[in-house]
């Protein structure tokens, strides 16, 4: 039987994956809003808006779940991250606030071209900043430069050097490309117009290649930037087969996009992203903040973890079907073009 | 600006901003499900139009509430890491439950706002009920965590660390019930009056407008009902304070001396240097009676506590006066409304009464801000009452003035836009 803290860690990893697959794609939608080009730019933006509107707030809650579990179960790690990574997290919060509000304001402000475009720009830029800063944060946590004392909770930091470095920013850009890829692939299925599908197909192909490049760059940089992760990624028994599997799925996904098998691509790309996050999670395990804080040495007592896990289980029973229903209502096959605002 | 002050200012500003949108997110769904329910029952399309119009304004507020709430959950760690390292696990239970409730709220909100033509009518109404339930529970759980900071229970301290944590006991601390009740009622009350005020404004110009009449009736009923309930919860809060946080009660009443038969003070200027309160109208023995059911009960004064353990008296006292004052006006508005309805056997749309209700539009929110000031500033200098000082909880991060200014500018910008957009939503159809 696992220790309880590992179950919580598992729930956090799954929540992060779901957040990337749903909320991450919403940020990707913002990216494609910025790069909406050509005759069909307006139509592209409309599809993105239509796809995001009913679900982005629910998708966003997965991030809250991760934060809450972090501070409830691993409070010292939360305090450490909040202290050492104050700046990228604050920038991320700015992104979260501006993304959400600009998106809603655009819908309810006057619909003149200039106003609409101004909100679109803000929405798009915020959609780019947020995943980069999320990635920077995760990269910094993995980099092994945040030295915290488990006993005292005191973290030695200059507040900058652990995140303002090549490796964390590589992870930031990597995260951004994953968001863009997910969004482009999902968007091919948000329209019946073949021309628009082609637009998003092209975007998906380009970003799929960018994902591959950024995966390689991150891996190379990890030798210097995150040595313990590199060890986990490079030397474990499971690492080689795992990388091969991830790579195979990635290539299969590109093939599916190329061949216009969009429903298949919509399954494969999320699997690819899931495998990437799993790979990182297992490489970093058992550290929550490398190199000093592990899940075990920062976990609180079982008297706290047990009720939290019970709430998680009850929550899953309620939330998973409801979340599923939300997607069934808005992402089902036949109501693609019906009126949504009433 | 010193770092601690900047951190406190940023937290205060973030909460002051969020509490408005959170309250609207809690209470608007009630108005919407009432309107939609009446449509389902009477088939009168005006109610459907009403529910849809309200839901559009609410969509804007929800988004701002969701993202500003996210900011707060991070700010706990960004500004108060020491507090969170200590308290995170103890108040983890209400926060975990809040996460669950927020999930329910956000999921069903998507269905409610965008699913008018996609789900069956009754399912849509049910989605509205779930938004209401999720929002209410979210608020209750967050307030519960705040209540623990006022009356921390459910753990023991050994060598500066919390041990033997009992999350359930922490959640059910002595302040949870009274604070959650007071805040939840306040949200319905404030939103009820704000919405009634807006529709009253239009009714004065067009008293026969069916749309505004129905809207006014629903909103005023909700606001008036909760206005009349609120003094009961206020009374529960006062009794709890007298027992568990006497120094906060003393600051609220600007009571310096420990006294039997203490009065209630209306107005007055607390002089913190000379430790007296001047020019207050005193209602003799009222405070003793209200807190203990005994006109001669002893009330602890501020002098009972060392100066370094007292909150800023003037701020707490003035904020409390403002809250009670606003509440009082709305109670009167509620009672008059009920009486007029009974007299006229119909909607109370006398011109002077509509003007009065229009005047009441912002009062509930002013009361919420003031009441929140009372409870937060009244807890100072502690972040965890009698256990951890706010000064000891702050992050070592330097230059906190920068994020404070950043978030302030951001929130001022958002406030301006929200006002402009709401004006558009309200006036676009007129």
Image: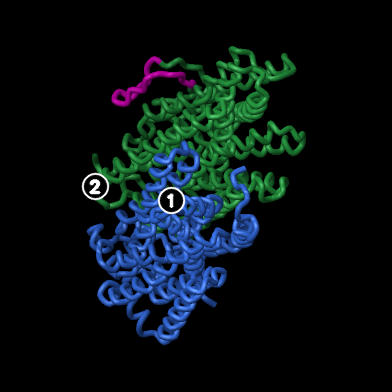
Chain colours: A blue, B green
Q: CA distance from mark 2 to mark 1?
A: 21 Å
Q: Quadrant of the N terminus of chain B?
A: top left
Residue B296 visible in rendering: no
10 Å crowding of disc 1: few (<14), some (14-19), many (20+): some
Residue named by callout 1: B73
Element type where label 2 sits in the image: loop
Q: Say whether residue B112 is magenta.
A: no
Please name whichever residue, A2 or B365, is drawn nearer the observer in this view of the structure: B365
| Residue B427 image position (x, y, % from top left) | 53, 27
Element type where label 1 sits in the image: helix
| Residue A259 image position (x, y, % from top left) | 51, 74
Q: Which of the marked residues, 2 or 1, is nearer the chain's N terminus?
A: 1
Please name whichever residue, B152 or B157, is drawn nearer the observer in this view of the structure: B152
Q: Say whether residue B269 is magenta.
A: yes
Q: Which mark is residue B399?
A: 2
What is the residue that sits farthest to the bottom in this orientation? A237
Please name whichever residue, B258 or A271, is drawn nearer the observer in this view of the structure: A271
Host chain of mark 1: B
Name the residue: 42% across, 57% down: A32
| Residue B121 image position (x, y, % from top left) | 71, 45
10 Å crowding of disc 2: few (<14), some (14-19), many (20+): few
The magenta span reads: B263-279
Host chain of mark 2: B
Residue B326 visible in rendering: yes
Name the residue: 35% across, 55% down: A129
Q: Quadrant of the C terminus of chain B?
A: top right
């Amino acid at each position: 039987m696992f220790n309880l803290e590992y179950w919580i860690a598992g729930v956090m990893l799954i929540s992060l994956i779901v957040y990337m697959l749903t909320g991450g794609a919403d940020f990707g939608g913002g990216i494609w809003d910025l790069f909406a080009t050509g005759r069909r730019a307006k139509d592209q933006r409309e599809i993105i808006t239509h796809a995001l509107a009913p679900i982005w707030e629910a998708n966003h809650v997965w991030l809250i779940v991760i934060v809450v579990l972090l501070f409830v179960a691993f409070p010292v790690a939360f305090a450490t991250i909040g202290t050492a990574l104050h700046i990228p997290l604050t920038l991320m919060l700015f992104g979260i606030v501006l993304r959400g509000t600009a998106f809603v304001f655009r819908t309810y402000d006057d619909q003149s071209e200039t106003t609409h475009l101004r909100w679109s720009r803000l929405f798009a830029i915020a959609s780019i900043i947020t995943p980069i800063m999320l990635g920077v944060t995760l990269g910094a946590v993995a980099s092994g430069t945040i030295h915290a004392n488990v006993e005292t909770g005191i973290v030695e930091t200059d507040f900058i050097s652990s995140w303002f470095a090549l490796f964390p920013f590589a992870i930031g850009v990597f995260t951004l490309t994953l968001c863009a890829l997910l969004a482009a692939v999902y968007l091919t299925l948000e329209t019946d117009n073949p021309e628009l599908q082609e637009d998003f197909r092209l975007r998906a192909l380009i970003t799929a290649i960018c994902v591959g490049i950024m995966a390689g760059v991150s891996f190379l940089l990890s030798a210097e930037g995150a040595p313990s992760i590199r060890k986990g990624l490079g030397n474990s028994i499971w690492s080689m087969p795992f990388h091969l599997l991830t790579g195979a799925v990635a290539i299969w996904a590109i093939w599916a996009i190329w061949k216009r098998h969009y429903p298949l691509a919509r399954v494969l790309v999320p699997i690819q992203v899931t495998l990437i996050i799993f790979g990182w999670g297992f490489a970093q395990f058992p550290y929550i903040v490398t190199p000093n804080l592990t899940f075990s040495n920062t976990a609180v007592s079982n008297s706290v973890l047990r009720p939290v896990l019970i709430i998680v289980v009850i929550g899953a029973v309620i939330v998973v079907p409801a979340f599923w229903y939300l997607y069934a209502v808005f992402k089902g096959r036949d109501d693609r073009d019906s009126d949504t605002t009433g | 600006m010193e770092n601690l002050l900047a951190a406190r200012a940023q937290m205060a500003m973030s909460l002051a901003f969020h509490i408005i949108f959170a309250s609207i997110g809690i209470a608007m769904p009630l108005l919407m499900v009432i309107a939609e329910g009446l449509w389902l029952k009477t088939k009168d399309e005006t109610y459907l139009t009403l529910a849809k119009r309200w839901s559009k304004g609410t969509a804007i507020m929800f988004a701002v509430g969701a993202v500003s709430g996210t900011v707060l959950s991070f700010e706990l760690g960004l500004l108060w890491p020491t507090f969170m390292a200590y308290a995170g696990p103890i108040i983890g239970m209400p926060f975990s439950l809040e996460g669950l409730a927020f999930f329910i709220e956000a999921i069903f909100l998507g269905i409610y706002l965008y699913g008018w033509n996609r789900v069956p009518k009754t399912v849509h109404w049910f989605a509205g009920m779930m938004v209401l339930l999720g929002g209410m529970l979210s608020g209750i759980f967050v307030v519960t965590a705040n209540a623990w900071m006022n009356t921390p229970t459910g753990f023991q301290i050994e060598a500066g660390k919390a041990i033997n944590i009992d999350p359930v006991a922490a959640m059910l601390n002595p302040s949870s019930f009274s604070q959650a009740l007071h805040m939840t009622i306040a949200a319905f009350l404030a939103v009820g009056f704000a919405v009634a005020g807006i529709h009253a404004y239009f009714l004065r110009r067009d008293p026969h407008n069916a749309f505004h009449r129905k809207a006014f009736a629903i909103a005023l009923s909700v606001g008036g009902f909760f206005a009349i309930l609120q003094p009961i919860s206020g009374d529960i809060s006062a009794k709890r304070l007298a027992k568990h946080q006497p120094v906060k009660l003393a600051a609220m009443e600007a009571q310096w001396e420990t006294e039997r038969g203490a009065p209630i003070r209306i107005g007055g200027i607390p002089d913190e240097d000379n430790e007296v309160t001047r020019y207050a109208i005193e209602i003799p023995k009222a405070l003793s009676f209200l807190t203990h059911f005994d006109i001669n009960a002893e009330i602890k004064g501020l002098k009972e506590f060392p100066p370094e353990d007292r909150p800023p008296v003037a701020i707490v006292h003035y904020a409390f006066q403002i809250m009670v004052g606003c509440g009082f006006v709305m109670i009167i508005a509620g009672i008059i409304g009920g009486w007029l309805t009974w007299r006229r056997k119909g909607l109370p749309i006398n011109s002077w009464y509509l003007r009065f209700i229009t005047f009441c539009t912002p009062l509930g929110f002013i009361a919420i801000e003031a009441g929140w000031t009372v409870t937060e500033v009244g807890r100072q200098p502690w972040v965890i009452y009698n256990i951890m000082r706010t000064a000891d909880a702050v992050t070592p991060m330097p230059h906190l003035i920068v994020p404070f200014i950043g978030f302030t500018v951001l929130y001022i910008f958002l406030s301006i836009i929200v006002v402009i957009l709401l004006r558009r939503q309200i006036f676009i159809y007129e």
